[in-house]
């Protein structure tokens, strides 16, 4: 997927996450926190590709990552997301200046990139280091960016139309329960506690 596609997809994801109230933090998120935070990280997984938008600007970081993991390796996995959340748990003090909706927006932007790349024939190794590729190949880059742009803009339209707080979302919905489970698991790992 192109950088333009990832940016539009991240905007659609941010709008959908807030309107669907995926978590209580996202439900009450400030638009001026959520959307820029998602945009900040939506291109970050491609740091593993020296010719990507970020790779060209951060060559000193992109080249070593590309050599170590290759394109669409570690940075396109759930392990990368878990490591990032773990680092935030360790290094971010409770009274940090960055609001919770910004942190969740940044996570959302990163995840939107991974989901968008799943829509291409190459897919992504969600369970890296396992090499299985997860894909739903509805976008083919050989046919140009028009289909990609149309799909991403349609997703923005759907996100804007989506009725807020649908029953399976919102407070006590499955996304909130999943996010809380992941956050508690990362917290236990950070604190050195076993699953008691």
Image (spheres, grey):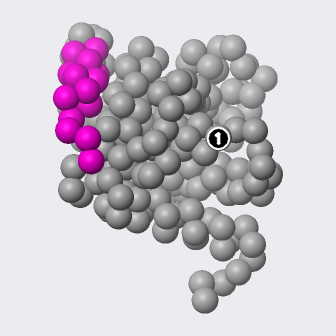
Above or below, 52 relative to 47: above
User: What quarter of the picture does the C terminus occupy?
Assistant: bottom right
Q: Where's residue 14, x and y in %?
A: 41, 33
Q: Where's residue 74, x and y in %?
A: 57, 46
Asked whether 153 falls inside the magenta stretch, the response is yes
Q: Where's residue 17, x and y in %?
A: 37, 40
Q: Count up the numbered dots.
A: 1
Asked whether 96 falls inside the magenta stretch, the response is no
Q: Kindly identify the residue that appears in the image at 53 percent across and 24 percent down.
A: 32
Q: Kindly identify the residue that appears in the image at 60 percent across and 45 percent down.
A: 100
Q: Which residue is mark 1?
A: 99
Above or below, 81 relative to 18: below
Tell me the SS state at disc 1.
Answer: loop
Q: Which residue is at the far bottom?
A: 196
Q: Nearer the viewer, residue 150 or 76?
A: 150
Magenta residues span 149-165
Packing grade of label 1 (10 A; few <14, some 14-19, many >=20) is some
Q: Nearer the viewer, residue 108 or 22?
A: 22
Q: Nearer the viewer, residue 88 or 165?
A: 165
111 to the left or right of 19:
right
């Amino acid at each position: 997927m192109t950088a333009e596609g990832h940016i539009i997809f991240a905007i659609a994801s941010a709008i959908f996450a807030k309107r669907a109230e995926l978590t209580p933090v996202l439900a009450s998120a400030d638009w001026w926190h959520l959307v820029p935070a998602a945009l900040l990280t939506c291109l970050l997984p491609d740091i593993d590709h020296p010719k990507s938008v970020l790779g060209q600007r951060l060559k000193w970081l992109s080249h070593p990552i590309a050599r170590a993991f290759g394109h669409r390796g570690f940075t396109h996995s759930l392990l990368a997301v878990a490591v990032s959340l773990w680092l935030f748990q360790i290094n971010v003090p409770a009274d940090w200046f960055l609001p919770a909706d910004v942190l969740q927006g940044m996570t959302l932007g990163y995840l939107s990139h991974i989901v968008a790349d799943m829509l291409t024939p190459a897919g992504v190794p969600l369970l890296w280091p396992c090499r299985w590729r997860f894909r739903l190949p509805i976008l083919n880059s050989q046919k140009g960016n028009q289909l990609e742009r149309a799909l991403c803009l349609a997703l923005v339209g759907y996100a804007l139309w989506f009725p807020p707080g649908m029953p399976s979302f919102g407070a006590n919905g499955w996304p909130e329960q999943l996010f809380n489970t992941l956050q508690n698991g990362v917290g236990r790992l950070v604190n050195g506690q076993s699953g008691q």
